[in-house]
Amino acid sequence: MRIGLLTEGGYPYVSGEAGLWCDRLVRGLEQHEFDLYALSRSESEETEGWVPLPPQVGRVRTAPLWESVDDHIVYGRRARRRFAECYGELATVLCTAGPGNPSAGPEGEPEGQSSLEADRFASALYGLAELARDEGGLPTALRSETAVRALERACRAPGAHRSAREARVPDLLTVTARLERALRPLSLDWYEDDDLGSVDLCHAASGGTAALPGLLARHFCDVPLLVTEYGVRLRTHYLTEPDSSPAIRSLLAAFHGRLAAETYRRAAVITPGNTHARRWQERCGADRAKLRTVHPGMDAAPFAEAGESPECADPQTLVWVGRVEPAKDLVSLLHAFAEIRRAEPGSRLRIVGGPSGPEGAAYLIHCKALAAQLFPDEADGPHAVGRNPVSFEETGGPELPSRADAYASGALVVLSSVVEGFPAGLVEAMFCGRATVSTDVGAVVEAIGGTGLVVPPRNPRALAEACVALLRDPDRRARLGAAARARALELFTVEQNITAFHGIYLEILSRTPARRVLLDDTGEPLPFGVPAEAHVPGRWSDPTARVAARGGPGTARSGPGWAVEAEPARAKTSVAASEGAAR
């Protein structure tokens, strides 16, 4: 089959998020063909280039979300009226929606009203998409004074939410700019029968803006959509917008919530990466019948040696591995270790990881100062050099060449986060056969099951007591470590992830009507010409038959496109871009 993989700020860019997961999926399903449609978030992603692509990738198309786009399109009177109506309707839905809760109507309205609001949002969204298709693009219109005034009227209209009514001019300008960036995929020229319309399935690697091309491919070409989310975009918005005004937060939360609800409504199958993400999806309106939890696949091979030799660990060493940032709450970990040292004077804590951005660098400096204050350098004798029991290190050096070596250096791995999605570092520790003590956040309990100890977040005393209990009981540590390794190998490997998605692909196509009609030499439809295996490599159907898309070929547009068709040299690989509509 032919799959259109949709990403935002991820694969195939070298520095993209979730790029490793997508690369493993594409390489693991080598019997299928993949077309990549990538939205880039920054100029640095474009500059750094792509990862080497496997031969089953036939086409790569990219479009930037980070640069200002001027389409130089001047709308006529009718087009301007269509835009004002559609954008005004979209703004009205955002202003009347309850902030961040698209499954309930504004101000506690009944469920029927919620369905009506969802239909209004969808009508406005697809109306804008059809306008962009007819006129050649939307970027200039989305940044125009017409858009700002439409948003202002919606905020001042009766029935608008209180936080929306408080929006000032700077808030309106900010929200308009953010909506223009989020809606930029509406202007792409990807939605023709020889482009996204030619794939058998669209697979969005995340929700939000990345799923918009899949929604439009379904709307224009009836291509089924699969959505995979390891982090729900609405939750990310709440975590990354703490300093914005209430009006900005409310309007953008309403947009992300409505977009998520529409994505879940149109998707054939939704695959959350964990139960924590699944609960957020259900809150945003996802139908439980469509949900299939597929845990992220991780490569267990680098951790095999550490997992098979747990006796090499220092029985008095605790290890923390991850990115240093405030959400990891290393301050609570250091205070907990102070209590651990009082109970077990010979214990040692190794904090392994680099800072995440400027905020992480400042936080690392603060943690080092706190460690020096809590644990003055201690010497074993009058002629020995003092040594702090807490060390801050990074992998790549002679002592810790890899993350596997970091986990292998201690008998106990600690996670102290206050915010966490799927704890990939914890799963790596499980691959290494290490007992763990973790805070109860995100999908931690789902990941470790009963193979580790869990304590409340921001509770140094509880964290210390759990660590001391395991430090004093080596047999229990060994049992928990062995159970953790067995659980990780069963649930979180690349193989189980690839197998799960292969089955979901077949499930979706098995209940999706054929969207193309095979014609014989006389131009008549060929009965039973498109079996389920039509795009599996091989000669399954009449080689003399030709393909015609229902509704005729797509109409070429003359508007200036800002999406980029991949060139082999730019990909830093020998993969050539394919222009075929069907294989």
Image: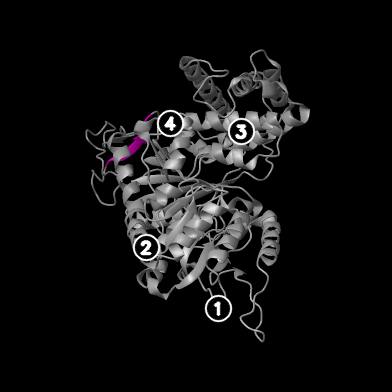
Image depth: mark 2 or mark 3 in front: 2
Label 2 belongs to which residue? 476
The residue tagged with tag 3: helix, strand or loop? loop
Q: CA distance from mark 4 to mark 3?
A: 30 Å
Q: CA distance from mark 4 to mark 1?
A: 49 Å
Query: Around disc 1, counting alpha carbons within 10 Å, would you say few (fewer than 14), some (14 to 19), or many (20 or more)?
Result: few
The residue tagged with tag 1: helix, strand or loop? loop
Coloration of the structure image: one colour
The residue tagged with tag 2: helix, strand or loop? helix
- In the rendered structure, which amino acid carries the disc numbered 3? Gly
Label 1 belongs to which residue? 398
Q: CA distance from mark 2 to mark 3?
A: 63 Å
Label 3 belongs to which residue? 137
Using the image, determine if residue 193 lies above or below residue 403: above
In magenta, the rendered stretch is 545-550
Q: CA distance from mark 1 to mark 3?
A: 54 Å
Q: Quadrant of residue 55?
A: bottom left
Q: Visible in this render: residue 363? A: yes
Which secondary structure dominates the residues rendered in magenta?
A: strand
The residue tagged with tag 4: helix, strand or loop? loop
- Name the residue at the right extreme: 169
Q: Visible in this render: residue 194? A: no
Label 4 belongs to which residue? 286
475 left or right, relative to 70: left
- In the rendered structure, which amino acid carries the disc numbered 4? Ala
Please report contact status of discs 1 and 3: CB closer than 8 Å, yes or no: no
372 left or right, relative to 286: right
Q: CA distance from mark 2 to mark 1?
A: 31 Å
- In the rendered structure, which amino acid carries the disc numbered 2? Arg
**Of the pair 116 and 314, the residue shown nearer to us:** 314
Image depth: mark 4 or mark 3 in front: 4
Image depth: mark 1 or mark 3 in front: 1
